[in-house]
Amino acid sequence: MLDQQKKQRILIVTSVAVERDAVIAGIGEDERFTFLIGGVGPAAAAASTARALTEARYDLVVCAGICGGFVGRADVGSLVVASEIVCADLGAETPDGFHSVDELGFGSARVPVPDELAEQVEQAMLQAGLPIYRGQILTLSTVTGTAQTAQALAERMPGALAEAMEGYGVAIAAQASGVPVLEIRTVSNAIGPRDKSAWRIKDALEALQKGSAVLREVL
Ligand SMILES: O=C(O)c1cccc(C(=O)CC[C@H]2O[C@@H](n3cnc4c(=O)[nH]cnc43)[C@H](O)[C@@H]2O)c1
Protein backbone atom coordinates (compact mmCIF):
# COMPACT_ATOMS: atom_id res chain seq x y z
CA MET A 1 0.00 0.00 0.00
CA LEU A 2 1.22 3.51 -0.72
CA ASP A 3 2.22 5.71 2.22
CA GLN A 4 -0.58 8.33 2.21
CA GLN A 5 1.39 10.62 4.60
CA LYS A 6 4.07 11.60 2.10
CA LYS A 7 3.49 13.02 -1.35
CA GLN A 8 3.62 10.12 -3.78
CA ARG A 9 5.02 10.33 -7.27
CA ILE A 10 3.28 8.08 -9.73
CA LEU A 11 4.41 7.35 -13.28
CA ILE A 12 1.64 6.29 -15.66
CA VAL A 13 2.84 4.60 -18.86
CA THR A 14 0.60 4.11 -21.89
CA SER A 15 1.62 2.83 -25.29
CA VAL A 16 -0.03 5.51 -27.46
CA ALA A 17 -1.25 9.12 -27.18
CA VAL A 18 -5.00 8.40 -27.21
CA GLU A 19 -4.60 6.18 -24.15
CA ARG A 20 -2.50 8.84 -22.39
CA ASP A 21 -5.13 11.50 -23.21
CA ALA A 22 -7.94 9.34 -21.79
CA VAL A 23 -5.97 8.81 -18.56
CA ILE A 24 -5.19 12.53 -18.24
CA ALA A 25 -8.86 13.41 -18.85
CA GLY A 26 -9.83 11.08 -16.00
CA ILE A 27 -7.16 12.15 -13.53
CA GLY A 28 -7.35 15.89 -14.19
CA GLU A 29 -5.01 18.33 -12.45
CA ASP A 30 -2.90 16.40 -10.00
CA GLU A 31 0.80 17.11 -9.66
CA ARG A 32 1.52 13.66 -8.20
CA PHE A 33 1.16 12.10 -11.66
CA THR A 34 3.57 12.01 -14.61
CA PHE A 35 2.39 10.61 -17.94
CA LEU A 36 4.62 8.80 -20.39
CA ILE A 37 3.90 7.47 -23.87
CA GLY A 38 6.16 4.43 -23.83
CA GLY A 39 5.55 3.04 -27.31
CA VAL A 40 3.99 -0.21 -28.52
CA GLY A 41 5.41 -3.54 -27.34
CA PRO A 42 7.41 -4.69 -24.31
CA ALA A 43 10.84 -3.55 -25.49
CA ALA A 44 9.82 0.07 -26.18
CA ALA A 45 7.81 0.14 -22.95
CA ALA A 46 10.74 -1.20 -20.90
CA ALA A 47 13.26 1.21 -22.40
CA SER A 48 11.01 4.26 -21.97
CA THR A 49 10.05 3.33 -18.42
CA ALA A 50 13.65 2.59 -17.41
CA ARG A 51 14.77 5.96 -18.70
CA ALA A 52 11.95 7.78 -16.86
CA LEU A 53 12.93 5.99 -13.65
CA THR A 54 16.49 7.26 -13.94
CA GLU A 55 15.26 10.84 -14.45
CA ALA A 56 13.05 11.13 -11.36
CA ARG A 57 12.04 9.29 -8.22
CA TYR A 58 8.71 7.44 -8.35
CA ASP A 59 6.83 5.49 -5.69
CA LEU A 60 4.60 3.59 -8.11
CA VAL A 61 4.53 2.80 -11.82
CA VAL A 62 1.19 2.15 -13.50
CA CYS A 63 0.87 0.59 -16.95
CA ALA A 64 -2.48 1.67 -18.39
CA GLY A 65 -4.29 1.33 -21.69
CA ILE A 66 -6.64 -0.80 -23.72
CA CYS A 67 -6.42 -4.57 -24.20
CA GLY A 68 -7.98 -7.70 -25.61
CA GLY A 69 -10.17 -9.74 -23.24
CA PHE A 70 -10.48 -13.52 -23.16
CA VAL A 71 -14.02 -14.51 -24.11
CA GLY A 72 -16.03 -15.46 -21.02
CA ARG A 73 -13.42 -13.93 -18.69
CA ALA A 74 -13.38 -10.16 -19.37
CA ASP A 75 -16.10 -8.45 -21.39
CA VAL A 76 -15.54 -5.68 -23.92
CA GLY A 77 -15.93 -2.31 -22.15
CA SER A 78 -14.93 -3.65 -18.74
CA LEU A 79 -11.80 -2.88 -16.73
CA VAL A 80 -9.12 -5.37 -15.75
CA VAL A 81 -6.57 -4.93 -13.00
CA ALA A 82 -3.60 -7.26 -12.92
CA SER A 83 -3.00 -9.61 -10.02
CA GLU A 84 0.19 -10.56 -11.86
CA ILE A 85 1.84 -9.37 -15.06
CA VAL A 86 2.94 -12.30 -17.24
CA CYS A 87 4.97 -12.35 -20.44
CA ALA A 88 3.17 -15.19 -22.18
CA ASP A 89 5.60 -15.71 -25.05
CA LEU A 90 8.88 -15.59 -23.12
CA GLY A 91 10.10 -19.16 -23.20
CA ALA A 92 10.56 -22.04 -25.59
CA GLU A 93 8.24 -24.07 -27.77
CA THR A 94 9.05 -27.78 -27.32
CA PRO A 95 7.50 -31.06 -28.51
CA ASP A 96 5.84 -31.17 -25.05
CA GLY A 97 4.37 -27.72 -25.42
CA PHE A 98 5.42 -24.25 -24.32
CA HIS A 99 7.90 -23.87 -21.46
CA SER A 100 8.25 -20.47 -19.81
CA VAL A 101 11.62 -19.07 -18.79
CA ASP A 102 10.63 -19.90 -15.18
CA GLU A 103 10.49 -23.61 -16.09
CA LEU A 104 13.66 -23.31 -18.17
CA GLY A 105 15.55 -21.73 -15.25
CA PHE A 106 16.28 -18.40 -16.94
CA GLY A 107 14.59 -15.85 -14.69
CA SER A 108 10.89 -15.14 -14.58
CA ALA A 109 8.19 -14.18 -17.05
CA ARG A 110 6.04 -13.01 -14.12
CA VAL A 111 6.08 -9.80 -12.13
CA PRO A 112 3.84 -9.61 -9.06
CA VAL A 113 1.49 -6.72 -8.33
CA PRO A 114 1.04 -5.75 -4.65
CA ASP A 115 -2.09 -7.64 -3.60
CA GLU A 116 -3.45 -4.95 -1.33
CA LEU A 117 -3.15 -2.30 -4.04
CA ALA A 118 -4.88 -4.41 -6.70
CA GLU A 119 -7.63 -5.22 -4.21
CA GLN A 120 -8.10 -1.54 -3.33
CA VAL A 121 -8.35 -0.61 -7.00
CA GLU A 122 -10.85 -3.40 -7.66
CA GLN A 123 -13.04 -2.41 -4.71
CA ALA A 124 -12.99 1.29 -5.60
CA MET A 125 -14.02 0.58 -9.20
CA LEU A 126 -16.85 -1.68 -8.03
CA GLN A 127 -18.05 0.98 -5.60
CA ALA A 128 -18.04 3.48 -8.47
CA GLY A 129 -20.22 1.07 -10.45
CA LEU A 130 -17.51 0.20 -12.98
CA PRO A 131 -17.27 -3.43 -14.13
CA ILE A 132 -13.83 -4.75 -13.22
CA TYR A 133 -12.08 -8.11 -13.11
CA ARG A 134 -8.85 -8.99 -11.29
CA GLY A 135 -6.46 -11.62 -12.65
CA GLN A 136 -3.39 -12.09 -14.80
CA ILE A 137 -2.83 -9.70 -17.68
CA LEU A 138 -0.61 -11.20 -20.35
CA THR A 139 2.00 -9.36 -22.36
CA LEU A 140 2.64 -10.56 -25.92
CA SER A 141 4.65 -9.01 -28.74
CA THR A 142 2.07 -10.23 -31.25
CA VAL A 143 -1.66 -9.52 -31.00
CA THR A 144 -3.52 -12.85 -31.02
CA GLY A 145 -5.44 -13.11 -34.28
CA THR A 146 -6.90 -16.59 -34.71
CA ALA A 147 -9.38 -18.76 -32.79
CA GLN A 148 -6.78 -21.55 -32.50
CA THR A 149 -4.13 -19.31 -30.92
CA ALA A 150 -6.71 -17.76 -28.60
CA GLN A 151 -7.91 -21.18 -27.44
CA ALA A 152 -4.38 -22.50 -26.92
CA LEU A 153 -3.42 -19.39 -24.96
CA ALA A 154 -6.59 -19.55 -22.82
CA GLU A 155 -5.89 -23.21 -22.02
CA ARG A 156 -2.22 -22.60 -21.23
CA MET A 157 -3.02 -19.56 -19.07
CA PRO A 158 -6.23 -20.41 -17.17
CA GLY A 159 -5.83 -17.43 -14.81
CA ALA A 160 -5.42 -14.88 -17.59
CA LEU A 161 -8.15 -12.32 -18.22
CA ALA A 162 -6.61 -10.20 -20.93
CA GLU A 163 -3.66 -9.61 -23.22
CA ALA A 164 -1.80 -6.47 -24.21
CA MET A 165 1.69 -5.64 -25.38
CA GLU A 166 3.51 -3.55 -22.77
CA GLY A 167 2.83 -4.61 -19.18
CA TYR A 168 5.79 -6.91 -18.72
CA GLY A 169 8.22 -4.36 -20.17
CA VAL A 170 6.98 -1.63 -17.85
CA ALA A 171 6.98 -4.07 -14.93
CA ILE A 172 10.53 -5.31 -15.49
CA ALA A 173 11.82 -1.74 -15.60
CA ALA A 174 9.94 -0.89 -12.39
CA GLN A 175 11.14 -4.07 -10.69
CA ALA A 176 14.76 -3.30 -11.62
CA SER A 177 14.39 0.06 -9.83
CA GLY A 178 12.63 -1.46 -6.82
CA VAL A 179 9.37 0.36 -7.55
CA PRO A 180 5.98 -1.41 -7.25
CA VAL A 181 3.92 -1.76 -10.41
CA LEU A 182 0.24 -1.89 -11.27
CA GLU A 183 -1.40 -2.67 -14.62
CA ILE A 184 -4.90 -1.48 -15.36
CA ARG A 185 -6.63 -1.71 -18.72
CA THR A 186 -9.99 -1.55 -20.40
CA VAL A 187 -11.13 -4.18 -22.87
CA SER A 188 -11.47 -2.91 -26.45
CA ASN A 189 -11.86 -6.28 -28.17
CA ALA A 190 -12.31 -9.99 -27.68
CA ILE A 191 -9.14 -12.06 -28.12
CA GLY A 192 -9.62 -14.19 -31.22
CA PRO A 193 -10.00 -14.00 -34.98
CA ARG A 194 -8.71 -10.67 -36.21
CA ASP A 195 -11.55 -8.24 -36.95
CA LYS A 196 -10.34 -4.72 -36.34
CA SER A 197 -13.80 -3.34 -37.25
CA ALA A 198 -15.16 -5.03 -34.11
CA TRP A 199 -12.68 -3.28 -31.78
CA ARG A 200 -14.59 -0.88 -29.52
CA ILE A 201 -11.68 1.49 -29.03
CA LYS A 202 -13.83 4.56 -28.32
CA ASP A 203 -15.80 2.72 -25.61
CA ALA A 204 -12.60 1.35 -24.11
CA LEU A 205 -11.02 4.82 -24.01
CA GLU A 206 -14.15 6.23 -22.32
CA ALA A 207 -13.97 3.43 -19.75
CA LEU A 208 -10.25 4.18 -19.29
CA GLN A 209 -11.11 7.80 -18.56
CA LYS A 210 -13.74 6.81 -15.97
CA GLY A 211 -11.42 4.27 -14.40
CA SER A 212 -8.60 6.81 -14.22
CA ALA A 213 -10.83 9.23 -12.27
CA VAL A 214 -11.38 6.49 -9.69
CA LEU A 215 -7.70 5.53 -9.73
CA ARG A 216 -6.79 9.07 -8.70
CA GLU A 217 -8.93 8.68 -5.57
CA VAL A 218 -7.36 5.34 -4.65
CA LEU A 219 -3.70 6.25 -5.07
O1 LIG B 1 -4.04 -3.48 -35.51
C1 LIG B 1 -3.38 -4.17 -34.75
O2 LIG B 1 -3.38 -5.39 -34.74
C2 LIG B 1 -2.56 -3.48 -33.73
C3 LIG B 1 -1.23 -3.83 -33.61
C4 LIG B 1 -0.47 -3.16 -32.67
C5 LIG B 1 -1.03 -2.16 -31.84
C6 LIG B 1 -2.36 -1.85 -31.97
C7 LIG B 1 -2.99 -0.82 -31.10
O3 LIG B 1 -4.16 -0.53 -31.18
C8 LIG B 1 -2.12 -0.11 -30.10
C9 LIG B 1 -2.74 0.12 -28.74
C10 LIG B 1 -2.49 -0.97 -27.65
O4 LIG B 1 -3.60 -1.77 -27.53
C11 LIG B 1 -3.31 -2.91 -26.79
N1 LIG B 1 -4.19 -3.97 -27.28
C12 LIG B 1 -5.49 -3.79 -27.53
N2 LIG B 1 -6.08 -4.94 -27.87
C13 LIG B 1 -5.12 -5.88 -27.85
C14 LIG B 1 -5.16 -7.28 -28.10
O5 LIG B 1 -6.18 -7.91 -28.43
N3 LIG B 1 -3.98 -7.94 -27.99
C15 LIG B 1 -2.84 -7.30 -27.65
N4 LIG B 1 -2.79 -5.98 -27.38
C16 LIG B 1 -3.93 -5.28 -27.47
C17 LIG B 1 -1.81 -3.11 -26.94
O6 LIG B 1 -1.22 -2.98 -25.67
C18 LIG B 1 -1.40 -1.96 -27.88
O7 LIG B 1 -0.20 -1.38 -27.54
C19 LIG B 1 -3.14 -2.51 -32.92
Image: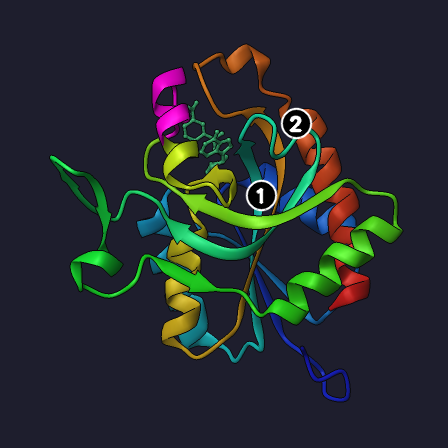
Mark 2 CB within 8 Å of ligand 1? no
The residue at 26%/48% (across/down) is: 90
The residue at 52%/80% (across/down) is: 57
Magenta stretch, main secondary structure, is: helix
Residue 146 in sight in this render: no
Position of residue 75 measured from the top left corner of the image (x, y, whole percent): 66, 29
Which residues fall within the magenta stretch?
143-152
Does label 1 or label 2 sit earlier along the sequence?
Answer: 1
Depth order, front residue of 118/63 = 118
Q: CA distance from mark 1 to mark 2?
A: 13 Å
The residue at 57%/24% (across/down) is: 189
Q: Quadrant of the C terminus?
A: bottom right
Position of residue 93 measured from the top left corner of the image (x, y, whole percent): 16, 39
- Is residue 143 toward the left or the right of residue 89 in the image? right
User: Which residue is the site of mark 1?
Assistant: 65
Identity of the residue furthest to the bottom in this view:
5
Residue 7 to residue 212: above or below: below
**146 drawn magenta:** yes
Mark 1 CB within 8 Å of ligand 1? yes
User: Which residue is the site of mark 2?
Assistant: 76
Q: Quadrant of the N terminus?
A: bottom right
